[in-house]
Amino acid sequence: MTQGIHSIATKAAQMTLDSIGDGVISIDVAGLITYLNPAAEHMTGWSSRAARGRSHLEVLRIVDAASRAPVLDPLALAILHDKPATLSANSVLIRRDGGETAIEDTCAPIRDAKGVVVGAVIVFHDVGATRARSLEMAHRVQHDALTDLPNRSLLAERLTQAMILARRRRSLLAVLFVDLDRFKRINDSLGHAIGDQLLRSVAQRMTVCVRESDTVSRQGGDEFVVLLPEIARIKDAAAIAAKILASLGAPHRIENRDLHTTASIGIGVYPGDGTDADTLLRHADIAMLDAKTSGRARHRFFEPRMSERVAQQIA
């Protein structure tokens, strides 16, 4: 009677494991596969018959999403330490056919009636969609909706890190504060839709003008900031500014018409023009205003006298 009840319970457990949406794989103490449920078959690309008796490392190939290095084996850890274990964050399961699935898991040791560890079980599920949504939300928080450039928040983060590195290496960095000349006239006369397309064109051209290690960000409106995290000489910043001015000055073809715009650029260099992010950006902004009042379509390096002139204008 007891044996019959045990058999019924075993079949019920088997049916439950076969019907759940999470992948379930069990191994013995030698690390050989003893069971795959249908969900695990689908996610690994291995049938239960083909996988049984093989090393779980052959069937359950898991790597770090960023480094592509194999992750610590949670099943082995569960057996070794006789306690539950989990995968590291950002783990990716490599299917038998080479496809990839982002997964999260829970592992636990399997004990016999005497409490001796005889294997381990892993329960895992696909988190690819959840992880993708999380990355998308993080991207939206840190990027401008119109141009997809880094926004103020991400620029501040990168500038702070760049200044820490520059301080450690005793090197130079520069920020370029870029403001389009007479953009309001275009926006008001041709409409915001045309103005938005012009801003996208400006963003694309500025991105082409800089190195991959540099950051082009939109601050809002027609204001942009370029971070040059490492420059050998101050004149390197001037060369990038001249390149941007030349690129933006060429006609922008938008809805079958050529739009002409120029820009004024102010340059602040670390550490001479500021040893913190706010000061350096403010001085680059002041230099940009000096470029505008000096005739537009040019760049200016920050000089202390510019602060006095701006203070007088405000007064």
Image (tube, helix red, strand yellow):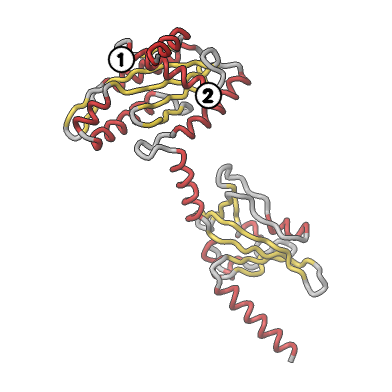
Per the rendering, the mark at residue 195 is none
- Location of the C terminus by quadrant is top left
Vertical side of 116 occupied by 86: above or below: above
Tell me where residue 183 appears, x and y as whole percent.
27, 26
User: Which element carries disc 2, helix, strand or loop?
Assistant: helix
Decide which of 181, 25 is in the foreground and name it.
Answer: 181
Say which amino acid is labelled 1: Arg
Residue at the outermost bottom position: 1
Decide which of 105, 49 is in the foreground and name it.
Answer: 105
Local crowd at mark 1 within 10 Å, few (<14), some, or many (≥20)?
some
Look at mark 2 in the image and give the residue it sits on: 277
Decide which of 75, 195 is in the foreground and name it.
Answer: 195
Which residue is at a point 35% across and 20% down the rendered structure image?
A: 244
User: Horizontal placement of 282 versus 207: left or right?
Assistant: right
Say which amino acid is labelled 2: Ala
Q: Would you identify the image quadrant in which residue 68 lies? A: top right
Residue at the outermost front position: 315
**Disc on the earlier residue, 1 or 2:** 2
Local crowd at mark 2 within 10 Å, few (<14), some, or many (≥20)?
some
Which residue is at a point 74% across and 62% down the rendered structure image?
A: 30
3D distance between C-alphas at marks 1 and 2: 25 Å
Tell me where residue 294 appears, x and y as whole percent.
32, 10
User: Which element carries disc 1, helix, strand or loop?
Assistant: loop
Residue at the outermost top position: 305
Q: Would you identify the image quadrant in which residue 160 lies? A: top right
Per the rendering, the mark at residue 296 is 1
Tell me where residue 212 appears, x and y as whole percent.
45, 28
Vertical side of 303 occupied by 228: above or below: below
Residue 207 visible in rendering: yes
Residue at the outermost left position: 256
Residue 239 visible in rendering: no
